[in-house]
Image (cartoon, rainbow, N blue to C red):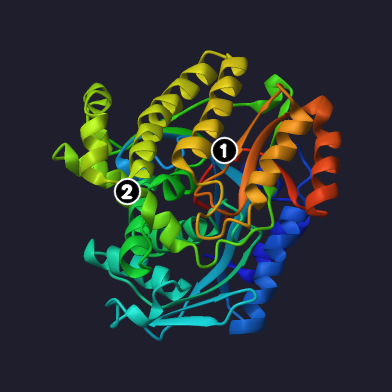
Amino acid sequence: MINVSELKEQLISGALNDKLAYIYSCSGDVEKYRDRYISVIDGYKEIFGEAEELALFSAPGRTEIGGNHTDHQHGCVLAGSVNLDVIAAVSYNDDNVVRIKSKGYKMDEIPLDDLEIHPEQFDKAIALIRGVLRKFSDMGYKLKGFNAYTESNVMKGSGLSSSAAFEVLIGTIVNHLFANAEVSPVEIAKIGQFAENVYYDKPSGLLDQMASSVGAVVAVDFKDNDKPIVRKVDFDLSKYNHSLCVIDSGADHAELTHEYAAVPAEMKTVAAYFGKEFLRDVDYDDFMREMKNVRETVKNDRAVLRAYHYFKDSQRAVDEAAALEAGDFETFCKLSRESGRSSYMYLQNVYASSLPYQQAVSLTIALCGEILGDRGAYRVHGGGFAGTVQAFVPNDMLDEFKSRIEAVLGDGMCHVLQIRPVGGYRLA
């Protein structure tokens, strides 16, 4: 950790500017990022009082580039970290208690002698913290008390995975404070998934945590969930004169857990027909040959369609990565548009069947199609049902695109983002 006065001086003087420019993929316009870290240091002081030394940490939100709802079936995905993140100022305490105060939320306190599951805390941030701490403890690391103050610009409910960013942030803090930074980004992602699945009680794959923890653009094969194959992919949108936009439709994810949970559950009913747990272990040709019998057995056509989407979109994620590596952006966009159509028609996660009159994502997709025509690409982003749409927009259309989208959805709803080159990170 670094003396607080010295740390603020490094930020103010510009000594950390190169690091900030690297982390946030900006060419020197680092003031807004610098000011956030100064703010989080001041926030720590306001909540916890003076500290002699502090450490600064960051974990990014993520964008799903390819492979929609394929990770939980051990399929393939393409994802990237973005230049929105959760940051923290951290210092040790002598109380054997972890205290984390996130701006705008109440303090979470976890005694380190109480790391069991608390069902009454399902769906709360404190459950994620406790789950991460428990996993590190089970791995044999000796934990001690610490205080952390966090601020985030990863919009909650945005489809950029604010929860995964938070899990990765906590995992990165614990890794550096108590594990000599020896736990790999891939393992930190798995720890985050454990916390979300077991302590937070939310079924999820590993895509969100992996993209946030590893950083940059990654192609991930989840065939072996314990040992996923992770490969970084060179993806510089500026080379292709396009920008990444994530559009907030204005719809809320609240009360939609049952819709998300139904996707892997229904896919698994199809896998079970073939005596398998996950669709990754089912042969696509067998699935197509047996489709009539599968329908009769599972008695759920939506489950069959969702399985069909899985097979096609998992392969599309592989093909998208190959297209980017070959410098074939036109083919990448074509595949991305195909993925969007598949999610709409077969995966059916663009709106919630339980809320048929609330179709903000569908409306946003219609706007994208109207504006872009056959240029660029657009698709539902992430889990779906509510939240966001992702678009790759030609730079010569960017101003018009943003203006027309926000004329309908409201100011500030179209976010122009950069791919960030690193995941969970200790700045100082």
Q: Closer to the camera, 326 or 293?
A: 293
Mark 1 Cα shell of 10 Å, populated few (<14), some (14-19), many (≥20): some
Farthest residue, direction left: 275
Q: Amino acid at mark 2?
A: Glu
Viewed as shown, does residue 397 lie left or right of 211? right
Q: Position of residue 411 (x, y in %)?
A: 83, 54
Q: Quadrant of residue 127?
A: bottom left
Q: Secondary structure at mark 2?
A: helix
On screen, residue 99 above or below 285: below
Is residue 21 at all visible to an observer of this figure? no
Q: Quadrant of residue 156?
A: bottom right
Q: CA distance from mark 1 to mark 2?
A: 35 Å
Viewed as shown, does residue 203 lie left or right of 23? left
For the C terminus, which image quadrant?
bottom right
Viewed as shown, does residue 109 lie left or right of 118? right
On screen, residue 82 above or below 319: below
Q: Position of residue 197 (x, y in %)?
A: 33, 61
Give yes or no for contact between labels 1 and 2 (Cβ–Cβ under 8 Å).
no
Residue at (28, 70) in percent of width and height: 142
Give the residue at mark 2.
266
Q: Position of residue 282 (x, y in %)?
A: 22, 32
On screen, residue 424 above or below 21: below
Q: Closer to the camera, 312 or 113?
A: 312
Q: Secondary structure at mark 1?
A: loop
Q: Closer to the camera, 409 or 122?
A: 409
Give the residue at mark 1.
421
